[in-house]
Image (spheres, grey):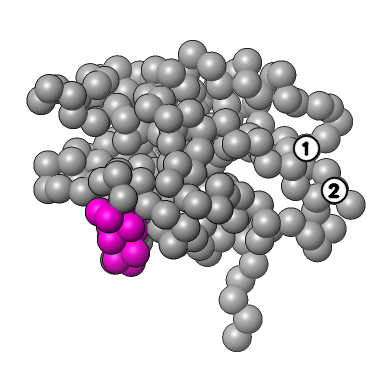
Amino acid sequence: MEDIRIYFIGDSYVNGTGDPQYLGWPGRVCAASNGNGVAITGYNLGIRADTSADVLRRWEEEVASRRLTPHDGRIVFGFGANDCFLVDGQIRVKRTESEKNAYEILSKAKDLLPTLMIGPPPGLGEEQHALRKDMSSLMQEIAARTGVPYLDVIQGLGDAATWREEAGSGDQVHPAAGGYAALAQLVLDWPKWWFYSPPQS
């Protein structure tokens, strides 16, 4: 059986904050992908409030301390939402810095191991949601520039009302189990996901 280590690196949405089952979307994706000749070890390296600057500072050491050759390794990033989070009317990270950070992260990671990027989810409120959409577009552009497959989840999660309903009834930021399950399904249905299984006709 192939032994694969997947490093999920990012913010509270990677961490699964708000999920009463403590799985988030990475746990659900690994559970659904494990088997059929593949044994997955998933490392959840999501940290609440992390921005692209925080991820840039730590991701290489996080992977290096857990990587064990000759086992196969993969990296999945999820960040950007905290970069555009408003604090006293100002975003936390300037857009130009977000662009610079993301480019450095993705270009280095892609040269190290197979890498994917999951975009930021929808925000509550028109202003925050617009900022998230702009950030997702920026991350998608940088991912394309570096050759890293990118999954934009804003529309998919926005169309599935569960994410917004759970976040709205919770801390106004994070969903519960249903929202993370919806995000996990978007990843599993993505042909770029390494363990994608086409639907049976």
Q: Secondary structure at mark 1?
A: strand
147 sits left or right of 133 in the view = right
**Residue at figure coordinates x 59%, y 76% from the top left:** 199
- Report crowding for label 2: few under 14, some 14 to 19, many 20 or more residues within 10 A (C-alpha): few
Provide the residue span drawn in magenta.
Answer: 158-169
Q: Residue 84: give x, y in percent of width and height.
A: 24, 30
Taking the magenta stretch, the answer to whether it contains residue 161 is yes
Label located before the other in sequence (1 or 2): 2
Mark 1–mark 2 Cα distance, whole angstroms, equals 8 Å
| Residue lying at 27% horizontally and 37% vertically, measured from the top left | 135
Kind of element beneath mark 2: strand
Number of labels in the image equals 2
To which quarter of the image does residue 142 belong? top left
**Residue under label 1:** 72
Q: Residue furthest right?
A: 1
Q: In screen coordinates, is 170 left or right of 11?
A: left
* Residue 88 vertical placement versus 110 (above, below): above
- Across and down, in percent, residue 27 comes to 61, 50
The residue to which callout 2 is attached is: 2
Q: Quarter of the image holding residue 144?
A: top left
Q: Is residue 57 left or right of 142 when viewed as pictured?
A: right
Q: Badges 1 and 2: C-beta atoms under 8 Å apart? A: yes
Residue 92 lies, in percent from the top left, at 24, 21
Q: Is residue 176 above or below residue 88?
A: below
